[in-house]
Amino acid sequence: MPLSLELDLDIKRVRQLLPNSSVAELTQRYHLQYNGVSARYILRNDNSGSKSPWARLMRRSSIFEVHSLPALDKALIARDRRYEANVRAKIDFGSVPFTMRLLMFWVSDWHRECDWYAWTFQP
């Protein structure tokens, strides 16, 4: 069963008296599928087209780590300002087969998206 995943990233400038202003938003899309011929999982980055083969998902925790994600241009941020980055992962529910959607409806522990993870930084 192929699975479409999305990684949402939102960067805002933190302001004291005014609401935070949006600096950049990015949605990175991935497609995870098992290839029976090679007996490997293939993770394809839909934005760049790059592919990564994985023999097993559970033994390779790095498949769930994000590295070197180009989020924004350096010209958009100032050195003397503070920023907040927010990231979350979610499954594209429309790409899930109908029978799996029915199962997900009845299983209460299944979540289509995680909570936002936020941190602040100052370049």
Image: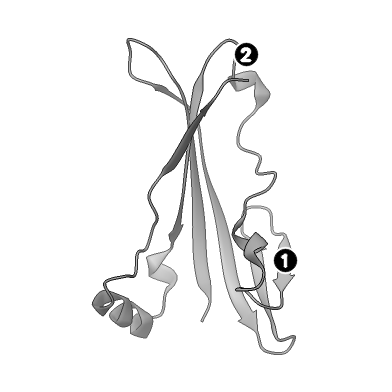
How is the structure coloured here?
A: one colour
Q: Of discs 2 and 1, which sits in the foreground?
A: 2
Q: Which residue is mark 2?
A: 79
Q: Image quarter for residue 91? A: bottom left
Give 51 or 84, whichever is nearer the viewer.
84
How far apart are labels 2 and 1 at the CA level?
35 Å
Spot occupied by residue 110 in the image (x, y as percentages of width and height): 34, 70
Q: Secondary structure at mark 2?
A: loop
Give 54 or 58, whichever is nearer the viewer.
58
Q: Quadrant of the C terminus?
A: top right
Bin the neighbour count of mark 2 within 10 Å (Cα to Cα): few under 14, some 14-19, many 20 and up: few
Q: Is residue 83 above or below residue 27?
A: above
The residue at 45%/37% (across/down) is: 118
Q: Image quarter for residue 90? A: bottom left
| Image position of 80 (left or right of 68) | left
Q: Amino acid at mark 2?
A: Arg
Spot occupied by residue 50 in the image (x, y as percentages of width and height): 72, 59
Q: Amino acid at mark 1?
A: Ser
N-terminal-most mark, 2 or 1: 1
The residue at 37%/50% (across/down) is: 115
| Image position of 42 (left or right of 10) | right
Spot occupied by residue 86 in the image (x, y as percentages of width and height): 46, 38
Q: Is residue 71 above or below residue 6?
A: above
The residue at 65%/64% (across/down) is: 44
| Label 2 close to label 1 by CB (< 8 Å) | no
Q: Secondary structure at mark 1?
A: strand
| Image position of 16 (left or right of 66) | left
Q: Which residue is mark 1?
A: 52
Q: Is residue 47 above or below residue 73?
A: below
